[in-house]
Image (cartoon, rainbow, N blue to C red):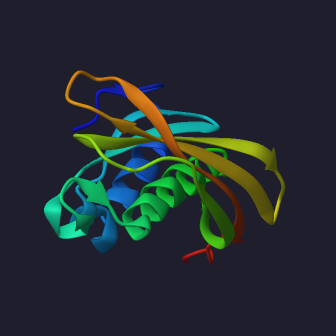
Amino acid sequence: MTTDIGNASDPHLRQLERMVLSMPMARTLGLTFTRITPGEVEVEIPVLDAFCFKPGQLQATAVFAVADFAAVAAAGSLLAPGWINATVDATLKLVAPAQGALLRARGRVLNAGKLLTVCAADVYAVNADGEETLCATLLGTARNVQLPVQA
């Protein structure tokens, strides 16, 4: 459920949210947007046993996925209509265990270019009381692609 979508009337941001949430991996992870504005996105996933390597602690794969979704969605929020993007490179650094009730990732754009956008995300483990602990940070690059014009 989306809770704080900036510029809720902006059809581009709404379409970006729909496109991301239509991806099978996003659905599998239980990804939700909690904030989306031009250049910044916040997403969350629940900590599910299916993604844990030990009870309550997520595998790095799920941590990477939520960070990637946040960073690249932030990059996508700045694209002109008719453009999409995809990850071409990303580095994740784990700094604390990913354990708690959910993971919250805040993505942002560092440099938006015509063909490449450099983006980043910080991932926080959120406990049942809502307290956040930084558990990972990602630096990525998204390739921007113009869709063919349909006649």
Quadrant (top left, top right, bottom left, bottom right) of the N terminus: top left
30 sits left or right of 5 in the view: left
Q: Which of 78 and 120 is in front in this view?
A: 120
Residue in the picture at 61% in, 73% down: 147
Q: Nearer the viewer, residue 8 or 27?
A: 27
Residue in the picture at 64% in, 51% down: 75
Quarter assignment of residue 14: top left
Tell me: residue 40, above or below residue 55: above
Tell me: residue 10, above or below residue 71: above
Q: Where is residue 43 in the image (x, y as percent from the top left)?
A: 40, 43
Q: Where is residue 30 in the image (x, y as percent from the top left)?
A: 22, 56
48 sits left or right of 25 in the view: left
Is residue 6 in sight in this rendering? yes
Is residue 23 in sight in this rendering? no
Tell me: residue 87, above or below residue 117: below
Q: Position of residue 12 (x, y in %)?
A: 50, 45
Residue in the picture at 83% in, 59% down: 114
Quarter assignment of residue 29: bottom left
Q: Position of residue 108 (x, y in %)?
A: 64, 40
Tell me: residue 126, above or below residue 120: above
